[in-house]
């Protein structure tokens, strides 16, 4: 429902009908052509649309199973921006880069544009919906006649809510068939471990916010683990030095990842020994008498073997360190140990997670920071075992129709499982996906789904969280929502089930929401409940955690070490979901491909993380291609050499190495699944990502690694500064250590008088303690400001266009310590870029913005040369976007032509909009009215924006914090951005 | 006609110098055609660049100035010594200038014309180059006089105007001499107009020498100012490696150094081809070599002073920059510069080297190379290694930039080749000043 005004659903549909002329013309003609030239043809203008004024539609993000609430911004009939829904309890307003980039799925040039079928020559040919559906129905009817209805498999990604039940209803009505929902990154071991330890077969949600001590056994919750936006937000509250408090975070993993970079302590554990450490900690806590949990006696017997010395030797962690962690963890009021990630998914990962559960149990965390009442629905997907048996039945010809939707098993299953060979044995493959993939290339019939920006739907990511998906624009292509396809197929099949007798999927959806209505808010009218839910983006129930008790099953668990395929080589092979591409589904979105990976700043490719010691042994340096080999296969990729990984380990991210996903993702990097053996976790049957050692050798080839930042060290330039807790407490709130903001600057040295501002002086504060370096701000800025992606070749030539970048510095010392600092235009009061421009194309405006006048710029580039922060970007070319990507462009922001400079504007269009709104409401601008895209989306809430003249504003308070400083203050540029030093724990 | 053993007389001076303007040889034509083809390649590179975008050049964040600005500073520097030789040395009564000043003045004019191309070539939107000029317009847009680029516009255009005038005024008596000699109608017509009706009367000579002196006095400060202003393009910016007060004298000395280098490079072959050994003497070359010694010493000192100040200031950005210059990605270029500009010219302390024309020619080539790299190093290395290590990057020139650079040399030599064949390359009038006055009865 539109946020702009309270309207009835009918009017909204009217609006869509009229606005739909823009895209709807395409639906009639059956294929995409140029967007019609007409500017919204208002003969009779609809009530709720004013050209140039956006409407916001609450919806739910479907880019990963986290199910964050989103707001889709519709301007003149097109969705142009996606932001987090502030009302969603998952992400409360923030969104990650992948969520922001869902627009590039919507406007992806490789999307299926109409139904397609494979003709006799084996080529895909467009057809009409009627024809395509008839073909679909024909196949099903044929199978029904042959009595093979039970040989239908509906393979989907994680679907929850009404679509899940619709698929099941559909299969039931056909009279057989199986629905398998499959996610490559699943949490089966976590679920199984919970069943074994607590008797609850669920993936709980965690309360990081209220924990004051977190140990993560490889769970990279800042990147992809379960619900990254929500957990980043919580982590920032727990660890962000709010109100002078800061919890401790210990990250246990063979590779640093983003979580290790943000941890107070990164414990470089030997791969696969997380269980040993967890059990060692359990024993240590019990032995030191620090636990008050019940049933300790049996647990003690269970872990008796894990004395400090043994654990220390096995895990390669100093005994003192283990002791220290055990004590701190047990002493903490609310501790939390988490685990269950790809990087630690060995063949005993269930046991590892059971050990983690025991750790939580003895430390008394269950029921405090772990909530089984609000568990993640990702736990409901099928297990890897089921997929394996599906492959078996496919290869033995027991599957006659495979319907795939929103899943890409050909890519995301280990090659050694041979899903693609099995697929060839299936007589009919039909795909309902909206995007091409390796799997859809096997389909004989493609019935393309509309994207979740174009269709109705729902998504229940956690118990008690019912997210609604509503169309924010008309379909741009001749696509049809999957729900409607199933319903119309049901009608054509003349299925008698009353469950399928709906006109369209919206009716079905509403009907299934009636259950939620009657269960929770039956005192309201359904229409009211529906309308409110639409406006809120869903219906949310907070469910408090309750206590759970230990199940006896865990006490008989035999903890065994994971087994590695040692024959292959001597380096452990670790893989992990990519922060931008996830399990590979984001690979065809240029924003994600060009989003610098936080630690390496690499883009558009794969790379292998290698420790410097290993590199020197192998005789390789950064950029050298290395062969990573197992008996299953070989991948060749470039090395990235740094200390963020153990010397006995090598790591490559998932997500690249596509062949059929589209122009941006094809033939780029490597797919780690090419070399992984088909091994499973013993107890849960989940795929064991961590199961092999590899042989690594130098290939002889070498090229420059394509990345944004060439350097590691700050070279004592004090760009990203830090302060220890002790120093901070000693300074007593004053900025005592000499580096910080000195307040008065060197005014006496200035030739020109200090600038005076009348009403507003915009400023930003960036809290380095909170910033985790995830890069959500970068994609948000790209989307808001029409910042071009430039492609791999141009990035390697140093033409990356991002207005905001996260600089990453590693400390020079022995320890691996990382600092992130978002760098964007500082909007200096005394800007070095301004006096050098010969034509006044850049100047300081009356509100303290450093303004860039595109039309006046002649392109001398002197401003950039003189910018101390190097945040200006030059348009070396006209960066043209393939159709229909230009539909995403924000009409409020100029698209820059070649030959001119551009840079961050503090989203001046948003400032103007906020001022307009305030003027309409006859009031002054108040704090929080203006939020630039980066500030709006930051999951860690590290960025704050506001009026520095308003002394009650948050940004004013922040910029006068004891930790505040200006970057390169000695240059007297007087920036409008104040940084807050990263608070580090003392090395004691 | 050439009677080289004979002593120089007034008539032989006329003969020898005007002889250079005879019908071009095949060799000249071949050279000219080759030159035009290189220029054509350069022009095509530029057109391609305008059409496609500046991306075809090698620019890489954060190095937003590269070969084009290097060429600009290089050619402005070359343009220096012409006026230095004709004006300052004229005021100092340095006799060795007489035979070479015309060539160096011509070089000045053509070098300014070449230099002037680059600020436009390097623009992102070259079609808007006139926005840098202060012209009244209905949108009331004005230029920013705070920007050193605007100072450049004025400094270079003033310098170009004055050096063209100076070049032309000094040539008037010679143009009259050619007018009197040539017979073909069109040539005679052109030289008649160009010589402004010069008759060579005492009255004319009196005013002419006065005017020339005043011009010299007027042009002399420009020699200092133009390159000082160019150096402010850098010194006024806050970039480490640029932001230093040593730049104006350092740039002026460098400019004189490089200009003299190119004068030698040009004079040696001309002297050989046109048999001008009697005119451009070894002593003349030695005089230039001495000036090169001096200026090489000054830039050597400047290199050392920059390093010292970077270290002495305790500024990590400055010091980081200079360590990077000597040891970083561009260390090779840095050491080429030091060797060519400081080490090799040390050999000029020996008279044997100073008076050896071949050696001088080779050294002058090294100076040209060294000075090009000096500008490249100042511009590119400074930009690639600034304040924030998160931004460091390396720039490599692209083929298009190399093509346009080659084109610029062709552009310069095109004018120079035309000059050799159309205007007196050595001042006839001034050469006569040092000859004994012809007396009655003596053989004319």
Image (tube, rainbow, N blue to C red):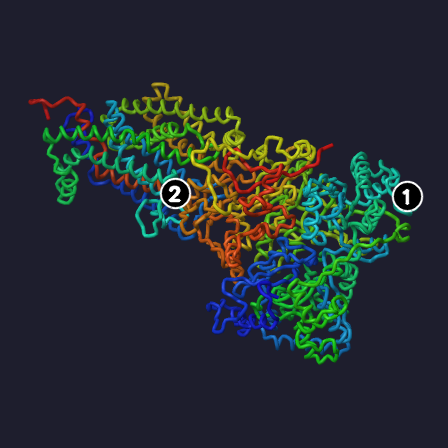
Query: Considering the image in quadrants, where does the N terminus of chain B appear?
Result: top left
Are marks 2 and 1 in one subunit?
Answer: yes
**Along the polypeptide, which appears first: circle 2 or circle 1?**
1
Residue under label 1, please give it: A300
Number of numbered tags placed on the structure image = 2
Query: Quick one: A931 or B173, which is closer to the camera?
Result: A931
Choose between A538 and A987: the one closer to the eye: A538
- State which chain disc 1 sits on: A
* Residue B426: x %, y % from top left: 22, 31
Query: Quick check: B329 left or right of B68?
Result: right
Which chain does tag 2 point to?
A: A
> Is A164 on the left or on the right of A945, as rendered?
right
Q: Residue furthest front?
A: A922
List x then y, in percent, for residue A774.
Answer: 64, 48
Report the residue at 69% width, 52% height from top. A228
Please, what secondary structure does the residue beneath circle 2 have? loop
| Residue under numbered circle 2 | A838
Up the image or down, A727 lies above or below A958; here it is above
Query: x, y percentage for residue A19?
Result: 53, 69
């Amino acid at each position: 429902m539109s946020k702009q005004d309270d309207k009835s659903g009918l009017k909204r549909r009217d609006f869509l009908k009229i606005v739909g002329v823009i895209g709807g013309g395409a639906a009639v003609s059956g294929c995409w052509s140029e967007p019609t030239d007409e500017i919204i043809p208002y003969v009779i203008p609809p009530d709720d649309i004013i050209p140039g004024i956006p409407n916001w539609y609450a919806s739910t993000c479907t880019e990963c199973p986290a199910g964050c609430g989103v707001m889709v911004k519709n301007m003149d009939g097109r969705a142009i921006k996606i932001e987090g829904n502030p009302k969603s309890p998952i992400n409360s307003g923030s969104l990650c880069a992948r969520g922001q980039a869902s627009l590039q799925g919507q406007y992806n040039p490789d999307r299926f544009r109409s139904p397609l079928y494979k003709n006799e020559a084996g080529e895909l040919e467009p057809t009409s919906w009627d024809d395509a559906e008839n073909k679909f129905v024909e196949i099903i009817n044929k199978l029904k006649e042959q009595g093979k209805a039970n040989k239908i498999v509906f393979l989907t990604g994680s679907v929850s809510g009404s679509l899940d039940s619709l698929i099941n209803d559909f299969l039931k009505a056909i009279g057989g068939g199986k629905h398998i929902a499959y996610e490559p990154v699943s949490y089966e071991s976590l679920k199984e471990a919970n069943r074994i330890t607590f008797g609850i077969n669920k993936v709980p949600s965690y309360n990081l916010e209220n924990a004051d001590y977190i140990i993560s056994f490889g769970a990279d919750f800042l990147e992809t683990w379960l619900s990254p936006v929500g957990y980043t937000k919580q982590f920032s509250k727990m660890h962000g030095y709010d109100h002078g408090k800061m919890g401790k975070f210990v990250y246990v993993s063979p590779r640093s990842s983003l979580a290790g970079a943000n941890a107070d302590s990164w414990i470089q554990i030997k791969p696969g020994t997380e269980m040993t450490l967890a059990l060692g900690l359990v024993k240590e806590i019990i032995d030191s008498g620090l636990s008050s949990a019940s049933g300790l006696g049996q647990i003690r017997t269970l872990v008796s073997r894990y004395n400090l010395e043994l654990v220390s030797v096995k895990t390669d962690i100093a005994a003192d360190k283990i002791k220290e962690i055990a004590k701190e963890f047990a002493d903490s009021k609310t501790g939390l140990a988490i685990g269950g990630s790809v990087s630690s998914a060995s063949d005993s990962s269930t046991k590892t997670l059971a050990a983690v559960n025991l750790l939580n149990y003895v430390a008394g965390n269950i029921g405090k920071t772990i909530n089984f009442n609000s568990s993640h629905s990702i736990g409901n997907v099928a297990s890897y075992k089921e997929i394996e048996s599906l492959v078996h039945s496919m290869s033995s010809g027991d599957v006659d129709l495979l319907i795939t939707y929103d899943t890409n098993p050909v890519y995301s299953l280990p090659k050694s499982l041979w899903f693609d060979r099995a697929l060839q044995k299936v007589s009919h493959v039909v795909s309902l996906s909206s995007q091409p993939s390796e799997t859809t290339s096997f389909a004989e019939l493609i019935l393309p789904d509309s994207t979740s920006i174009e269709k109705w739907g729902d998504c229940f990511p956690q118990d008690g969280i019912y997210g609604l998906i509503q169309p924010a624009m008309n379909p741009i292509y001749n696509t049809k929502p999957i729900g409607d396809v199933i319903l119309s197929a049901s009608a054509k099949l003349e299925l008698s089930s009353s469950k399928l007798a709906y006109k369209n999927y919206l009716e079905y959806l509403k009907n299934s929401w009636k259950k939620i209505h009657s269960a929770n808010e039956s005192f309201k009218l359904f229409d009211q409940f529906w309308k409110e839910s639409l406006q809120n983006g869903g219906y949310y129930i907070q469910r408090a955690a309750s206590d759970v008790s230990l199940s006896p099953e865990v006490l008989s668990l035999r903890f065994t070490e994971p087994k590695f395929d040692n024959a292959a080589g001597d380096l452990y092979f670790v893989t992990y979901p990519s922060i931008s591409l996830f399990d590979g589904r984001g690979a065809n979105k240029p924003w994600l491909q060009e989003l610098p990976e936080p630690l390496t700043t690499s883009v558009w490719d794969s790379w292998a993380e290698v420790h410097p010691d290993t590199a020197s042994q192998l005789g390789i340096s950064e950029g050298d291609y290395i062969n990573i080999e197992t008996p299953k296969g070989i991948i060749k990729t470039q090395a990235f050499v740094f200390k963020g990984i153990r010397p006995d380990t090598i790591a490559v991210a998932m997500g690249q190495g596509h062949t059929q996903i589209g122009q941006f993702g094809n033939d780029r990097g490597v797919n780690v699944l090419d070399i992984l053996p088909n091994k499973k976790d013993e107890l849960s049957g989940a795929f064991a990502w961590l199961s092999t050692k590899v042989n690594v050798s130098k290939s002889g080839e070498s090229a420059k690694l394509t990345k944004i930042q060439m350097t590691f060290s700050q070279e004592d330039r004090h760009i990203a500064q830090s302060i220890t807790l002790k120093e901070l407490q000693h300074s007593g709130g004053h900025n005592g250590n000499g580096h910080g903001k000195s307040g008065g600057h060197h005014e006496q040295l200035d030739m020109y008088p200090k600038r005076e501002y009348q009403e507003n002086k915009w400023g930003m504060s960036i809290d380095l303690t909170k910033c985790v370096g995830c890069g959500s701000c970068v994609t948000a800025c790209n989307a808001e400001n029409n910042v071009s992606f430039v492609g791999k070749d141009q990035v390697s030539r140093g033409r990356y266009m991002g207005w905001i970048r996260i600089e990453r510095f590693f400390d020079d010392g022995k320890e691996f310590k990382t600092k992130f600092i978002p760098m964007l235009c500082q909007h200096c009061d005394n800007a070095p870029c301004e006096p050098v421009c010969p034509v006044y194309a850049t100047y300081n405006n009356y509100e303290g913005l450093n303004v860039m006048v595109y039309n006046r710029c002649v392109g001398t580039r002197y401003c950039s040369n003189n910018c101390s922060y190097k945040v200006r970007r030059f348009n070396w070319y006209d960066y043209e976007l393939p159709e229909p990507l230009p539909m995403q462009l924000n009409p409020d922001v100029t698209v820059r032509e070649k030959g001119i400079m551009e840079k961050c504007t503090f989203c001046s269009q948003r400032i103007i909009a906020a001022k307009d709104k305030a003027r309409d409401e006859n009031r002054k601008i108040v704090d929080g009215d203006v939020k630039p895209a980066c500030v709006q989306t930051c999951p860690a809430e590290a960025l704050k924006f506001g009026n520095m003249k308003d002394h009650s504003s948050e940004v004013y308070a922040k910029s006068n914090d004891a930790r505040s400083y200006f970057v390169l203050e000695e240059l007297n540029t007087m920036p409008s951005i104040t940084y807050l030093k990263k608070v580090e724990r003392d090395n004691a | 006609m050439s009677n080289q053993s004979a002593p120089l007389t007034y008539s032989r001076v006329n003969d020898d110098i005007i002889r250079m303007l005879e019908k071009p040889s095949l060799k000249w034509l071949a050279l000219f055609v080759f030159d035009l083809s290189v220029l054509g390649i350069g022009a095509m590179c530029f057109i391609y660049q305008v059409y496609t975008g500046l991306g075809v050049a090698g620019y890489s964040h954060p190095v937003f100035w590269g070969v084009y600005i290097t060429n600009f500073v290089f050619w402005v520097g070359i343009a220096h010594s012409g006026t230095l030789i004709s004006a300052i040395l004229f005021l100092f009564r340095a006799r060795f200038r007489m035979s070479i000043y015309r060539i160096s003045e011509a070089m000045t004019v053509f070098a300014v014309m070449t230099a002037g191309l680059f600020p436009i070539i390097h623009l992102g939107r070259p079609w808007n180059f006139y926005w840098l000029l202060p012209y009244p317009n209905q949108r009331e847009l004005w230029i920013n006089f705070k920007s050193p680029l605007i100072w450049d516009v004025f400094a270079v255009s003033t310098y170009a105007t004055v050096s063209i005038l100076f070049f032309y005024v000094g040539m008037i008596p010679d143009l009259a001499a050619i007018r009197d000699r040539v017979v073909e109608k069109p040539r005679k017509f052109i030289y008649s107009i160009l010589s402004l009706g010069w008759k060579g009367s005492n009255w004319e000579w009196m005013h002419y020498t006065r005017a020339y002196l005043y011009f010299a006095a007027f042009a002399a400060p420009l020699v200092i100012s133009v390159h000082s202003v160019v150096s402010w393009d850098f010194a006024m910016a806050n970039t480490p490696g640029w932001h230093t007060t040593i730049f104006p004298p350092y740039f002026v000395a460098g400019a004189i150094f490089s200009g003299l280098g190119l004068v030698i490079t040009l004079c040696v072959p001309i002297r050989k081809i046109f048999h001008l050994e009697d005119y451009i003497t070894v002593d003349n070359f030695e005089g230039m070599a001495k000036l090169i010694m001096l200026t090489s010493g000054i830039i050597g000192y400047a290199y050392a002073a920059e390093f010292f100040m970077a270290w002495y200031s305790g500024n990590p950005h400055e010091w980081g920059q200079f360590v990077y210059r000597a040891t970083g990605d561009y260390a090779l270029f840095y050491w080429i510069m030091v060797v060519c500009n400081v080490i090799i010219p040390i050999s000029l302390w020996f008279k044997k080297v100073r008076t050896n024309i071949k050696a001088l020619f080779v050294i002058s080539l090294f100076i040209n190379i060294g000075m090009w790299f000096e500008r490249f190093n100042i511009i590119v290395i400074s930009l690639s290694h600034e304040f924030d290590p998160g931004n460091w990057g390396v720039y490599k020139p692209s083929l298009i930039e190399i093509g346009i650079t080659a084109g610029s040399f062709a552009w310069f030599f095109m004018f120079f080749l035309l000059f050799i064949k159309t205007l007196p390359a050595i001042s006839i009038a001034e050469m006569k000043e040092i000859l004994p006055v012809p007396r009655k009865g003596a053989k004319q």
